Image (cartoon, rainbow, N blue to C red):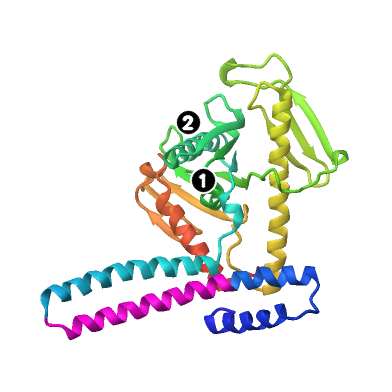
Amino acid sequence: MNDIQDIQKRYDELSAKLSSEQLNNSERSTIGKEYSFLTNILEKHKEIQETEKNIHDANAQISNTDDAELRQMFKDEVLELEVKLKKEKDILEELMFPADETNKANAYIEIRAGAGGQEAALFVADLMRLYTNYGLKKGWNVSIVDYSQTDLKGFKEVILHVKGKNVYGHLKYESGVHRVQRVPLTETSGRVHTSTVTVAVFPEMEEEVKFEIDPEDLKIDVYRAGGAGGQHVNKTESAVRITHLPTNVVVTCQDDRSQHKNKEKAMKMLKSRLLVAQKEKQDAEMQQQRKEQVGSGSRAEKSRTYNYPQNRVSDHQAELTLAKLEYIMEGDLDEIIEALQAKEKQERKKAGIAKK
């Protein structure tokens, strides 16, 4: 069902079904949702046809008049109508191939050192600064939930909480393996090393989302939160670690001085991670059924390479290379994110019109 004729046919079928008195309330509700969804698409398509007709008529007037003032007036009208037409087509595309509702959510970013020892840990700190700066440019609120620092001011791992408009829709593409190629500070012979950092991004669950976890499946530990260089160290056991035993998923939080608040935040993170794992499993099953590989955004995939000697960043998902690494590391991510969003949009269109 990828063209208007198919939509119109389906709309007519549903219209006939809704006129039947044999439908029960549940069936009527289900059919009604799809009917409303298709109605919006057809109405927007009708608006587009009307605008296209107005453009055609205005162009005809330009051809048929010798009056310079009138010709200019119709030319101006055509320009305005073409801007309107583009907006209407963009809206229609979003109606037919809507983005995931999860895109609107806040997000957690987990950044962990991979291969490369101290150099990988230093790059974790660099990525933390990159995402913090990007968040500030977007007007988001970025805070550190948990971290484990090294003696060279790097991080074995750090977890950020990012709050704002459409955060997950921008940051979800960051999941994957990030490779850095540069001469480490600890390298005396000037050789370029390749190190890796893994990034995982999870949407923050909304309060109204029902996701039950059996308390028997949880192991909860409390411990003293640590600070960098002995600063701001808690004297009480306020940090919280929660392990979900069936999946072995572990979340930690030492953001707050209150153990209760840290436990609350950790539970929210755990639910978000388990919900994403569940969704990824469903997506994988759907892809298997379709026998189609469209790029899952899995955390196992190579995401991006940062090449310092060549001042180059290559995003492997977007198939985009930019020679401005220094700007990107300061949070200038828009060009990459927009390319990834455009690619996802194309994949939504390949998958066909959403079912409502």
Q: Is residue 319 left or right of residue 302?
A: left
Q: Could you tell me if the residues under marks 2 and 1 are in contact, i.e. CB atoms within 8 Å?
A: no
Task: Point out the frontmost of discs 2 and 1.
Answer: 1
- Is residue 318 at all visible to an observer of this figure? no
Identify the residue at horizontal 74%, vertical 26% (top origin): 260
Tag 2 secondary structure: loop
Identify the residue at horizontal 57%, vertical 36% (top origin): 117
Identify the residue at horizontal 52%, vertical 26% (top origin): 152
Q: Is residue 241 left or right of residue 120?
A: right
Identify the residue at horizontal 58%, vertical 80% (top origin): 7
Amino acid tagged 1: Lys
Q: Give the labeled residue for mark 1.
A: 165
Is residue 186 positioned above or below 95 on the image? Answer: above
Amino acid tagged 2: Thr
Residue 19 coordinates in the image, percent (x, y): 71, 80
> Residue 259 falls in which quadrant of the image?
top right
Is residue 50 positioned above or below 152 on the image? Answer: below
Is the residue marked by circle 1 packed among few (<14), some (14-19), or many (20+) residues within 10 Å? Answer: some
> Earlier along the polypeptide chain: callout 2 or callout 1?
1
- Is residue 253 at all visible to an observer of this figure? yes
Residue 124 coordinates in the image, percent (x, y): 53, 37
Q: As drawn, which residue projects farthest toward the right?
A: 216
Queried whether the magenta region covers residue 74, the answer comes back as no
> Residue 18 falls in which quadrant of the image?
bottom right
Placement of the C terminus among the 4 image quadrants = bottom right
Is the residue marked by circle 2 packed among few (<14), some (14-19), or many (20+) residues within 10 Å? Answer: few
Q: Which residues are magenta?
A: 39-66
Residue 14 coordinates in the image, percent (x, y): 67, 79
Q: Give the labeled residue for mark 2.
A: 186
